[in-house]
Amino acid sequence: MKDINSAPGSTSFSAFWNELCAYARQGMAALRTMSWPMLLVCCLGLAFLITILPLAIMLFALVMLLRWASNNDDAGADQKASASQRSPQ
């Protein structure tokens, strides 16, 4: 007996899986046709994208966060300094 009530989303998942497999086949075909130097350049570029670029972005975000935190501390110190410099009346 055929199941008339298929699971929701199963058709979209199978379509996604089919497209993913098609992209994988295209990628493998492209790798088979590449020369060794071009393959080396692609591997180095992929390694750069996977490792060095996220590290640089994370370090940039960390430095900006530290700068922001240090600016917040300085703002409070400036207010205290200006209050202490006033002459008592």
Image (cartoon, grey):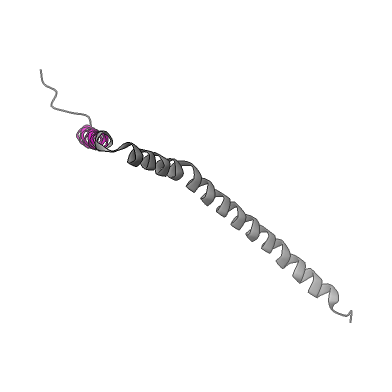
Outermost residue on the left side: it is 1
| Residue 89 occupies quadrant | bottom right
Q: Position of residue 79 (x, y in %)?
A: 75, 71
Which one is in front, 12 or 41?
Answer: 41
Q: Position of residue 51 (x, y in %)?
A: 49, 42
The majority secondary structure of the magenta stretch comes to: helix
Instruction: Please give the range of residues in magenta.
Output: 9-29
| Residue 50 occupies quadrant | top left
Split into 4 quadrants, where in the image is the N terminus? top left
The image shows residue 13, relative to residue 87, as above or below, that is: above
Q: Position of residue 68 (x, y in %)?
A: 63, 60
Outermost residue on the bottom side: it is 89
Q: Is residue 52 left or right of residue 23?
A: right
Which one is in front, 70 or 2?
Answer: 70
Q: Is residue 70 magenta?
A: no
Image label count? 0
- Residue placed at 36% from the left, 42% from the top? 42
The image shows residue 49, relative to residue 31, as above or below, that is: below
Outermost residue on the top side: it is 1
The image shows residue 1, relative to residue 83, as above or below, that is: above
Q: Position of residue 47 (x, y in %)?
A: 44, 40
Q: Is residue 25 magenta?
A: yes
- Residue placed at 38% from the left, 43% from the top? 41
Q: Is residue 63 left or right of residue 15?
A: right
- Residue placed at 57% from the left, 50% from the top? 59
Which one is in front, 80 or 44?
Answer: 44
- Residue placed at 28% from the left, 38% from the top? 34
